[in-house]
Amino acid sequence: MASKPMKLSITPTQAVSLQLKRVTLSPETHDAFLTYKRAIADVYNVEIEDEDLAAKLIEQALRNDRSLRNYRRSSAGRLVASQRSAPQPSPAAEGAE
């Protein structure tokens, strides 16, 4: 019986940048991470850097987190989003005061 190709939910891209310098994983999570990385290499015939894969996994987890979506819809979540998108004063403007 021929096996079907594994379907992966993350497709590697080139446009990912991760600012974290170090992430500590449990041994089980590290093994799963390496297995996932090998699966991408086997299925898509492409190597993906650890930082790129970690970024994509984090993006996917945050995008699919229902609690986070509910929080963002709440008044507290909207306040956080509005603070993030508010224009920040320039250093020159701060020195002029």
Image (spheres, grey):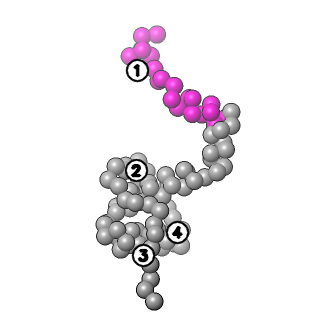
Query: Foreground mark, 4 or 1?
Result: 4
Label 1: element kind: helix
The residue carrying pointer 3 sits among few (fewer than 14), some (14 to 19) or many (20 or more) residues within 10 Å by Cα, namely few
Q: Secondary structure at mark 4?
A: helix
Q: Is residue 67 above or below residue 95?
A: below
Circle 2 crowding by C-alpha within 10 Å: few under 14, some 14–19, many from 20 = few
Element class at badge 3: loop
Quarter of the image where one finds residue 45: bottom left
User: Can you tell which quarter of the image residue 12 is in?
Assistant: bottom left
Q: Which residue is mark 3?
A: 5
* 50 or 3, nearer to the observer: 3
Q: Which residue is mark 4?
A: 29
Residue type of the residue flagged with mark 1: Pro
Q: Please state the horizontal and vertical placement of residue 73, each as a whole percent of the image.
A: 65, 38
Name the residue beneath numbered marker 1: 91
Kindly indicate whether the residue at mark 3 contacts the one at mark 2 (C-beta within 8 angstroms).
Answer: no
Residue 15 location (% of width, % of height): 34, 49
Along the polypeptide, which appears first: circle 2 or circle 3?
3
Q: Amino acid at mark 3?
A: Pro
Q: How many angstroms separate mark 3 from mark 4 (CA)?
A: 23 Å
Q: Read off the magenta span.
A: 76-97
State which quadrant residue 94 falls in: top left
Task: Tell me the crowding category of disc 1: few under 14, some 14 to 19, or many 20 or more residues within 10 angstroms, Cα based.
Answer: few
Front: mark 3 or 4:
3
**Residue 80 image position (x, y, % from top left):** 60, 34
Which residue is rendered at x = 41% and y = 20% of the image? Answer: 90
Asked if residue 96 is among those painted magenta in the image, a careful observer would answer yes
Local crowd size for mark 4, using a 10 Å CA cut-off: few (<14), some (14–19), many (≥20): few
Determine which residue is flagged by label 2: 18
55 vs 14, nearest the viewer: 14
- In the image, residue 26 sits, relative to residue 77, either above or below, namely below
Camera-side residue of 57 and 25: 57
